[in-house]
Image (tube, rainbow, N blue to C red):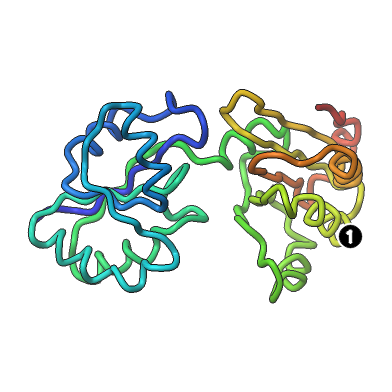
């Protein structure tokens, strides 16, 4: 029996893909891609020719059974997202669950994901953290934020350039303006940048500097402020 293999792809720099990921993509009988145009750029860069099929949040429910049927017939199937690891704020969970329900083997390769370099580069504690991904845009947003007020672990959020200023302001309102945080954007790309400071200073920065690129926000947990030696943590860009 063939299998489903989750293949992480670079979050920016195409050189970050692993040799093992390339081997899987070259041998796959089908590649499921969040956006076939984006994946085609990667495949063309490495000279890979393989059948591509769209698999995204708008069609994944409808295509689950057909994909599973194909794997059972012997098609080695690779799942990729536009960037990073499938299933991490990207499509992947539903097809993995359905494959497991049908006793279809699933394998997940290690590889790029945006929140790890952002966390490590933040200067905030990385031994314990919680990944929150994208906050709800409307319904449930304030409830989710309120539930994090006493979170002691470092918190990680994904955000778009269109909402990053709003999110920083809301985090400051709920968690406190002086809460330490960092904002990383365009990770692994030419204009990669990480800015560290308080939620207030970061919100001020992006109120005068147009946000560009995809963002990862890392926020200190509630316990971080209980250590006086951390109060001199410097704000820097």
Mark 1 highlights which residue? 173
Residue 220 spot, x, y in % from top left = 76, 46
Quarter residue 138 falls in: bottom right
Residue at position x 39%, y 58% from top? 92
Q: Quadrant of the C terminus?
A: top right
Q: Quadrant of the N terminus?
A: bottom left
Q: Residues within 10 Å of mark 1 (few under 14, many from 20)?
A: some
Residue 18 spot, x, y in % from top left = 35, 29
How many numbered callouts? Answer: 1
Residue 175 spot, x, y in % from top left = 84, 57
In the displayed structure image, the side of residue 59 where residue 214 appears, left or right: right
Looking at the image, residue 72 lies above or below residue 181: below
Residue at position x 55%, y 40% from top? 114
Residue at position x 16%, y 47% from top? 29
Query: Can the viewer see residue 25?
Result: yes
Looking at the image, residue 12 lies above or below residue 73: above
SS of the residue under disc 1: helix
Residue 113 spot, x, y in % from top left = 50, 41
Query: Can the viewer see residue 227?
Result: no
Residue found at the far front of this picture:
37
């Amino acid at each position: 029996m063939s299998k489903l293999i989750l293949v992480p792809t670079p979050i920016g720099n195409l050189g970050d893909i692993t040799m093992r990921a390339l081997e899987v993509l070259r041998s796959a009988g089908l590649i499921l891609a969040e956006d076939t145009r984006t994946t085609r750029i990667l495949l063309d860069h490495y000279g890979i020719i393989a059948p591509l099929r769209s698999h995204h949040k708008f069609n994944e429910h409808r295509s689950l059974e057909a994909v599973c049927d194909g794997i059972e017939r012997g098609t080695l199937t690779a799942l990729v997202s536009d960037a990073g690891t499938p299933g991490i704020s990207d499509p992947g969970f539903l097809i993995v669950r359905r494959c497991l329900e049908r006793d279809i083997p699933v394998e997940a390769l290690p590889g790029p994901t945006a929140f790890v370099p952002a966390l490590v580069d933040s200067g905030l504690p990385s031994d314990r953290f919680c990944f929150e991904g994208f906050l709800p845009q409307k319904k449930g947003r304030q409830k989710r934020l309120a539930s994090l007020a006493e979170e002691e672990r470092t918190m990680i959020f994904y955000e778009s350039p269109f909402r990053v200023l709003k999110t920083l302001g809301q985090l400051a309102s709920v968690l406190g303006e002086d809460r330490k945080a960092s904002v990383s954007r365009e990770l692994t790309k030419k204009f990669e940048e990480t800015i560290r400071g308080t939620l207030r200073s970061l919100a001020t920065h992006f109120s005068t500097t147009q946000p560009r690129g995809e963002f990862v926000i890392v926020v200190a947990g509630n316990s971080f402020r209980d250590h006086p030696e951390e109060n001199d943590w410097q704000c820097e860009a």
